[in-house]
Image (cartoon, grey):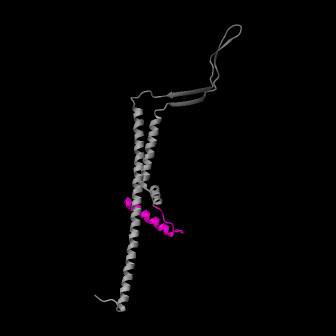
Amino acid sequence: PKMLLIIALLVIGMACTGNAEALRQLTVDEFVQAGLQHNRKLHVVRMRGAQAEARQDESFSVLLPTLKVSAAYSRLSDAPDFTITIPSYPRPLSMTLSETVPNSYQTKLTLQQPLFLGNRLTSQYSQQKQVALASRQDLLAEERELALAVRTAYWALYQAREVGRVVEDNVRQVESHLRDMENLMSQGMATDN
C-alpha cells in the first residue's frame, strides 16, 4: 500500500509535468520532499513526537515551584456602629462596642515546592525525556525509510521508461530490417528460405 501510494505520487507528478508550460521534469529530491510533506503515516509519527515533547514539558513543570496569588474584596452592610448609652450624671456616656467595617479585603500568597517524593518526579521526567528522544528517532527512521521508498520507486519508474524506450528502438530496428528484407526480396536480391 505504501509503495502503491508512492508510485501513484510519481505517476501523478509525471503527468502534471506533462501539462506544465515548460515541461519541467521533477527531480528525485523534489519527489522525496513531496513524499515527506504529504505522507500521512509520517504526519502521525510527527504528532506522536509532539505529544511526547508536550508530556516531557509537563513532567518538567511539576518539578518547578508553584506560586498562587489570590485577592478578594467584599462590601459588607451599611449598619451603624453598635453603641450603648449609659445614663450618668451630668451627661449620659456613649460607648461604642463594635465599629462597623463596611469593606473587607483579603490577599493570599502561596508558594509550594515539593521537596522529596521518593524521586518519583525526577524519574517521571527522565522517563518522558527518553520517550521524547525515542519518538524523535522514530521520526528520523520513518523519514529515511520513506525517502528510500520514494527513491526506489522513482528509479524503478525511470528504469521502466528506459526499458520502454529500448524496446521501442528495437521494434523500430526490426521493422527497418523487415522493410529492407522486403525491398531486397521484391528486387530479387534475397532468397526465400
- Which residue is located at x 57 percent, y 30 percent? 71
Check if residue 20 falls in the magenta segment. yes
Q: Residue furthest left?
A: 193
- Which residue is located at x 52 percent, y 28 percent? 110
- Which residue is located at x 54 percent, y 27 percent? 109
**Residue 135, image quadrant:** top left
Report the span colored magenta. 1-27
How many numbered marks have been drawn onto this rendered protein structure?
Answer: 0
Expressed as whole percent of the image width and height from the top left, the position of residue 138 reads 40, 48
> Quick check: 17 above or below 121?
below
> Quick check: 175 above or below 10?
below
Main SS class of the magenta portion in the image: helix
**Residue 182, image quadrant:** bottom left
Q: Quadrant of the C terminus?
A: bottom left
Expressed as whole percent of the image width and height from the top left, the position of residue 166 reads 39, 73
In the image, 129 versus 167, the foreground residue is: 167
Q: Quadrant of the N terminus?
A: bottom left
> Quick check: 187 above or below 3?
below
In the image, 114 versus 31, the foreground residue is: 31
